[in-house]
Every structure is written in C-alpha cells, then in structure tokens.
C-alpha cells in the first residue's frame, strides 16, 4: 500500500512539526499524570476520570502516528517553485465572483494545511480543483452545494 503524498508549504510543515513536538513532549506527560491521578481514586471500572484520560491518551497516540506518517510523506513547496503564470499549490489567487462582483483571495495549499476560515483552501476542494492550472483572466465554473459559481481569476502571486 502506497502512502499518499502530503503537499505542504514551509509554514505548514513547521505547524505540523510543532504540533507533533507538543503532543510528544507536553500532552503525553499531562495525560500520563491524569491517568496516574485517576488510578489513585481507586476502582477504575467505574472511574470516569480514568476513562476520559485513557480516551485522550488513545487520541494523542493516534494523532502522533498520523502526524509522523504525514511528515514522512511530505513534499515541501518552496516559494521559488511557485509559478505565477498559472494557479498551483502555494500560489495566492485573487478571484472575482462574476454574479456578485465580490473578490476573494485564496492561498492554494495541500489538504493537510487547508484552513478555509483563513482563506487557505485545498487543491482538492471544489474551488481549488476548478482553478488549478488556470491562468490570469480565466473564467471557471465551480460546482458548490448551492449550484454553480463563476469565478474569474484576477491575479496570481507567490
């Protein structure tokens, strides 16, 4: 089974490395302490603190495994690789909604870095897929749950 490549910007790589370090050095210790304290309460068969701590421990260990796998399969996009002639991962794209005239700036990132609230959209999202590879001035149709939105690519930059 081949592991899926994880596309990251330098900033995204740092964020995942920091999260992994925090989980390994801080969170593991905290949850181990919680388990120790909960065991001190006596009978663990009906001890909700113990159950909660064990569940959190399982989540932390699962997330550590996921992050390590992502980092092993990471491909870093450097700023000098970012092409401003067409939309690619790492590029920041200004699009205009042709129906309403609204302009929105998106940074195209890999799925691991996707953060729609901060206008970082995945290359696999509906908008990301529609504009990937397109050039400045192109008009694209984006299928969204509400129907089809037409976007014009106004600008592409690093």
Image (cartoon, helix red, strand yellow):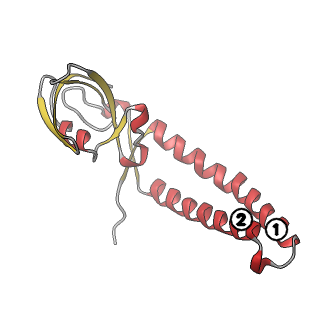
Q: CA distance from mark 2 to mark 1?
A: 8 Å
What is the quadrant of residue 94 in the picture? top left
Q: How many marks?
A: 2
Q: Residue 5: image x %, image y %?
A: 35, 55
SS at mark 1 in the image: helix
In the picture of the structure, the residue carrying the numbered disc 1 is 38
Q: Residue at x 50, y 60 (%)?
A: 66
Relative to residue 9, is residue 37 depicted above or below?
below
Q: Are marks 2 and 1 in contact (CB under 8 Å)?
A: yes
> Is residue 38 or residue 73 the one in the foreground?
38
Q: Which mark is residue 80?
A: none
In the picture of the structure, the residue carrying the numbered disc 2 is 53
Q: Residue at x 79, y 77 (%)?
A: 44
Q: Relative to residue 5, is residue 96 drawn left or right?
A: left
> Is residue 80 or residue 120 the one in the foreground?
120
Q: Relative to residue 110, is residue 129 drawn left or right?
A: left
SS at mark 2 in the image: helix
Q: Residue at x 11, y 29 (%)?
A: 139
Q: Residue at x 25, y 20 (%)?
A: 102
What is the quadrant of residue 152 in the picture? top left
């Amino acid at each position: 089974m081949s592991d899926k490549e994880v596309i990251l910007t330098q900033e995204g790589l740092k964020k995942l490395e920091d999260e992994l370090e925090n989980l390994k050095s801080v969170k593991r210790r905290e949850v181990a302490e919680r388990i120790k304290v909960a065991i001190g309460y006596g009978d663990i068969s009906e001890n909700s603190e113990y159950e909660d701590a064990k569940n959190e421990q399982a989540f932390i260990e699962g997330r550590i495994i996921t992050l390590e796998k992502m980092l092993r399969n990471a491909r870093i996009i450097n700023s000098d690789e970012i092409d401003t002639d067409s939309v690619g991962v790492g590029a920041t794209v200004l699009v205009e909604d042709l129906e309403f005239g609204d302009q929105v700036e998106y940074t195209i990132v890999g799925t691991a870095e996707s953060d729609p609230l901060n206008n970082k959209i995945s290359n696999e999202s509906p908008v990301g897929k529609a504009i990937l590879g397109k050039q400045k001035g192109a008009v694209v149709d984006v299928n969204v749950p509400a129907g089809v939105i037409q976007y014009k690519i106004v600008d592409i930059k690093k």
